[in-house]
Amino acid sequence: MTTVDDLKRRVAELLAAYPPESTPRQDFLDARFDAGLAWIHFPEGLGGLNAPRSLQSVVDKELAAAGAPDNDKRRIGIGLGMAAPTILAFGTPEQHQRFLRPLWTEREVWCQLFSEPGAGSDLAALGTRAVRDGDDWVVTGQKVWTSGAHKSQWAILVTRTDPDVPKHRGMTYFLCDMTAPGVEVRPLRQITGEAEFNEVFLSEVRIPDAHRLGAVGEGWKVAQTTLMNERVAIGGTEFPRDGGMVGVVAKTWRERPELRTSELHDRLLKLWVEGESLRLVSSRLRQQLAAGAPGPEGSAVKVAFSELNQAASGLEIELLGDEGLRYDDWTMRRPDGVNFLGREAGYRYLRAKGNSIEGGTSEVLRNIIAERVLGLPSEPRIDKDVAWKDLPR
């Protein structure tokens, strides 16, 4: 079994062979992956050592102390948090070898083609069709709210392959080349002025059957692994005490005593306690994740994260008064990711509104919490046994 000393020895050997100060960043990332120090809980040969996930922090701290480069988790977050665990769980050995190394080393960026204009919260109602044609599938449809599609080389994609069965059954999951003919990405400008999101049009896109993930018709099962990991990735982000959005407001409170009122003080204290509770619950969730696959509990953390961000950003605007109404930059641009803490209060307030929508709406996640965590009766679903083609639209 891998121990802390084993990991420190492996890190020391990596640093000796590839000194961070003289090794090109990409070369170091490649070497780290090949040494099994990328995600140590992954199998050997796939960037890991079959070691306990809880020991990853040992590697990360040793490398950070040495000034070693790391991959940009903000840029490749969808690949790391959603695509990789799904490919590992359902992929073939050939898919493991083809996709995991370039994903972790940032050679290939991933996006997520799930939501559609008519199937957002109800993902199982999606209508993007995939029709078998020899060794390929021909895919036609539209996806929406696709973060980072404009910078991605690959996408995880869920399609409808059998319209004659109930909606949860006739779905199939693919790995889609975003540079393939027929893929068109269009920006969606947000209230922040930026276009993180996109709509993606798929016009007779040919995908080899070798890029199918899981069995035909079992796309919903595969997608559940992606979604559970997505909610942990969004809500279970590690941040220090007095960190995150609440930490930003607390910093302003300490530095600007002239802005304080007793009412705002009470609200800040309440949010600080909620933030600390969320930090501890998130830490516990990551420990559970280290012991196995993520469960529905991640939905609760994601809901709490969304509500806390929105409440804290609103309090920051109130605290700053007229200053909070200023906005630093309305330029239309297509960023690599979200930069909550690197922008002004106005941006944080507007961007936080999306937290309760992206990664599963809070309404849908509350249903998951009620049914899968608390064991409450399911809501009546009259479409459960109806063929997808017969559903009203």
Image (spheres, grey):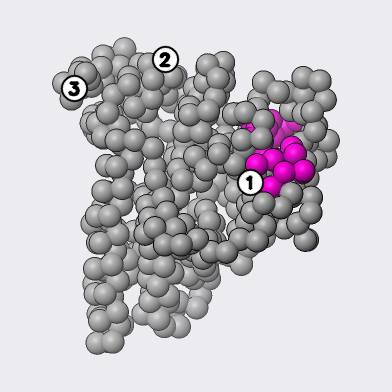
Magenta residues, start to end: 159-186
Quadrant of the rendering where the C terminus is positioned: bottom right
> What secondary structure is found at the residue carrying circle 3?
loop
Disc 2 is placed on an element classified as loop
Which amino acid is tagged 1? Answer: His
Q: In this view, does 390 lie above or below 254?
A: above
Q: How far apart are marks 3 and 1 (CA)?
A: 43 Å
CA separation in Å, label 2 and label 3 = 19 Å
Q: Can residue 127 be seen in this view?
A: yes
Q: Please state the horizontal and vertical placement of residue 271, each as a whole percent of the image.
A: 30, 71
Which residue type carries mark 3?
Thr
Q: What residue type is labelled 2?
A: Gly
Sequence-wise, which precedes: disc 2 or disc 3? 3
At 48% from the left edge and 27% from the top edge, which residue is drawn?
Answer: 88
Residue at 27 percent of width and 28 percent of height: 52
Q: In this view, does 43 lie above or below 249?
A: above
Location of the N terminus (image quadrant) = top left
Which residue of the protein is positioned furthest toward the bottom in this rendering? 262
Residue position for label 1: 168
In the picture of the structure, the residue carrying the numbered disc 2 is 45
Find out whether the residues at labels 3 and 1 contact each other: C-beta distance under 8 Å.
no
Disc 2 crowd rating (10 Å Cα; few below 14, some 14-19, many 20+) is some
> Marks 1 and 2: in contact by CB < 8 Å?
no
Residue 160 is inside the magenta segment: yes
Q: Nearer the viewer, residue 237 or 365?
A: 365
